[in-house]
Amino acid sequence: MLQPINQIQRRAQNSLKRLSKGFPVVALTGPRQSGKTTLACSVFPKKPYRTLEDPETRQLALSDPRAFLAQFPEGAILDEIQRTPELFSYLQGVVDAKQQMGLFVITGSQQFGLLEAITQSLAGRVGLVELLPLSLSEIASAQKVSPHVHNQLMFTGGYPALHNKRRSKSLRPTDWFRAYVTTYVERDVRQVLGVRDLASFERFVRMCASRSGQLLNLQALASDCGISVTNARQWMSVLETSYVVRLLQPWHENFGKRLVKMPKLYFLDTG
């Protein structure tokens, strides 16, 4: 039986520590609920923590960015910073003036928003660490994993909430993922990414799930979903940038053929 776990050592922890010694800013990216905040706070327990999801904190950061950053002379952990892209140019001024490694740790759940802001204002000043849901090796480091548990893990997935000792006994993976998808679709897809036809998008996600591990034929996928190939391509990009799926490009001795052959579609979490 799969047992709840108190504490799991994340593989990304060493990368986070190492990059904080070589860059003034370290960016921790990954899907929602993958454990970014927990990891950042455990590696840097002395740094003050602020989340830009909080309306009051976000308002202060937007209304007076200099005063907001001045609160943290020794740096801070700034969570979900993609919510305040205007802050990045001011952050650049602070790290350039201080010339101190590991000053700020920033996190973000939307790859496109965070990376776009980084490339515009913080290029060369940021070390990037990607934190995905728990891997089998991370779970196995905290408990004995038998072949039977392997099968259970495939359906449970690796999101930390499903392995939390205080919650997982009463929390069904199906209930958790239903809430996760609802939040993801309502918040990221509609509000942030601008997808309006949510019913069609949800059907698209389910059709993608049924094709996990298979060659991605966008034309066939679009036809089965009743949408245009253009929409299918855009929505696939949405799933990639929000860490839901990853496209595995084919290998071929001829580099040109690698670029034109169909990739395989994989969900980043099996649950």
Image: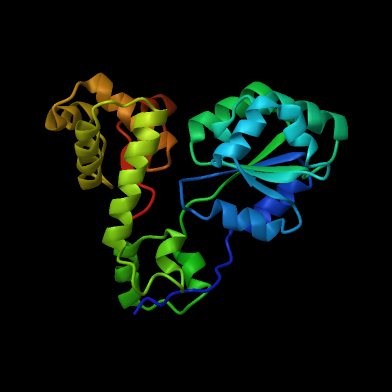
**Considering only vertical position in the picture, is 193 above or below 160?**
above
**Considering only vertical position in the picture, is 92 above or below 144?**
above
- Residue visible at 22% across and 36% down in the picture: 204
Left or right of 112, for residue 233:
left
- Residue visible at 37% across and 43% down in the picture: 244
Q: Percent from the top left, x then y, of residue 196?
A: 28, 25
**Considering only vertical position in the picture, is 158 above or below 167?**
above
Q: Percent from the top left, x then y, of residue 192?
A: 42, 29
Farthest residue toward the front?
56
Which quarter of the rendering shows the N terminus? bottom left
Q: Percent from the top left, x then y, of residue 195?
A: 31, 27
Compare residues 171 and 240 and report the one nearer the observer. Answer: 171
Q: Percent from the top left, x then y, of residue 90?
A: 73, 26
Left or right of 166, for residue 170:
left
- Residue visible at 77% across and 45% down in the picture: 102
Residue 79 in sight from this viewpoint: yes
For residue 231, which quarter of the picture?
top left
Count numbered badges in the picture.
0
Compare residues 125 and 191 and report the one nearer the observer. Answer: 191
Which quarter of the rendering shows the C terminus? bottom left
Left or right of 61, for residue 10:
left
For residue 236, which quarter of the picture?
top left
Coloration mode: rainbow
Residue 12 in sight from this viewpoint: no
**Considering only vertical position in the picture, is 201 above or below 179?**
above
